[in-house]
Amino acid sequence: MWRTLSAIVFLVAIVNPLAETRRLRLRSSDQLQLDEYLDYNGVMQYLDHLARAYPDRITLKNVGRTYENRSLKLAMVTNGDGRLGKRVIFMDAALHAREWMTPVAALYTIYKLVVEFEENADLLADFDWHIMPLANPDGYEYSRKTNTRWMKTRTPNGGNCNGTDLDRNFEVGFGLGFPDLRGPCDHNFAGRAPFSEVESRTVRDIMHSLMKSERGVMYLSLHSPIRRVIYPWVYDSTPVPNHGEHIEIAKFVADQIFQSTGTVIKTLQGVQYGEFGGSSIDYAFYVGFPLSFAFEMSGMDHNHVDYKFFPPTWEIRRLADESWTGIRAFGKKAIEKYPPSRAIHQSEDRLSNPSRGEGYAAF
């Protein structure tokens, strides 16, 4: 008996330090690389590292495969208290491939919530965050390695034309807008039908799952570089029922960024920027997210030189910090406006207009 107990004590003494050493070794490489733009593999490797180092705070889920067989990965971030059914902020990045700062901002958000958890615990007390850092990995890799200006997916359209603009491929108002939406070779091709792309279907299915479980509160899509906060509708000039809430949150985000960095962020209903259908923020609001925004981040350096989609690498860290200021402000106000005590209903617009978004202009 004593021999058995002694053996157990000996094993515990060995295993515990080994486990602790492994944990410390894993967490020694927690820092997100912010001196260059990560490629697809770099993004996936960093996510995998965090999931191994902080299994109680981040879980990764493979939610789809692209045309070029890359994984569409969702990072589900929580505070580790084990409480199920928390409300969710759902954020995606890089629907447009050439917007290289958006995966940086998404990864930086994950870093802030997971690694710097103590400083940001208020954002996870009653909410989880579900984040897709690369919603269009095929297009992102093509933009990085072949054609920097590339924006679309890489799905063949026939006639040596490839790609669909994912932010025109959602259902609400599909096909409405400028002529470029209709040409398979055009820069803004909306696709041959709503959700023709696996990437948009994947985002759609995440939205539906969150609304079915009554967890989805805010959808936030990261874009760059025009320094705007945009809210629905994009395809229609009619204000959404909680237009005032969207204005209040958008202005709060803009104010927080201006106070922190001096960068001016404009706020507007999407239709004021350009009337077109198929946007992800319109669809999110349509299916029931009470809050839905596109955050168009800055591409300017500290001297106000506008590099648009491709800020120099020495500006990445500063712009990531600025973007986090905005993202944190979005989260803070969403949590304030929709605490667990406030019921979430489907949008009044959807209930009163069941056909909204179901019809589209055929090409």
Image: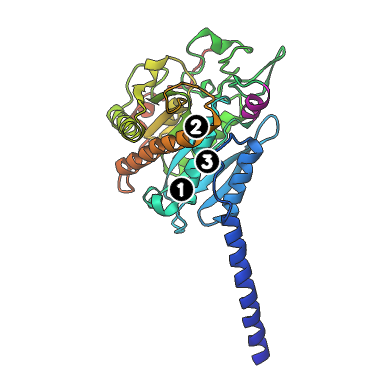
Does residue 128 appear in this view?
yes
Does residue 363 appear in this view?
no
Residue 207 % position (x, y): 49, 36
Of 113 and 242, the residue lying toward us: 113
- Quick one: label 3 or label 1, which is nearer the N terminus? 3
Q: Residues within 10 Å of mark 3 (few under 14, many from 20)?
A: many
Q: CA distance from mark 3 to mark 2?
A: 16 Å
The kind of residue on which mark 2 rests is: Glu
- Quick one: label 3 or label 2, which is nearer the N terminus? 3
Helix, strand or loop under label 2: helix
Query: Looking at the image, which residue is at 55% across and 32% down?
Result: 313
Residue at the far top in the pictured view = 179
The kind of residue on which mark 1 rests is: Leu
Helix, strand or loop under label 1: helix
Decide whether residue 272 is among the magenta residues. Answer: no
Question: In the rendered image, which quarter contains the C terminus?
Answer: top right
Up-down: is 263 above or below 190? below
Q: Which residue is mark 2?
A: 315
Q: CA distance from mark 2 to mark 1?
A: 22 Å
Q: Which residue is mark 3?
A: 107
Q: Residues within 10 Å of mark 2 (few under 14, many from 20)?
A: some
Q: Which residue is mark 1?
A: 113
Characterize the magenta stretch by its predominant secondary structure: helix
Q: Residues within 10 Å of mark 1 (few under 14, many from 20)?
A: many
Give the residues drawn in magenta, as a range: 138-146
- Quick one: label 2 or label 1, which is nearer the N terminus? 1
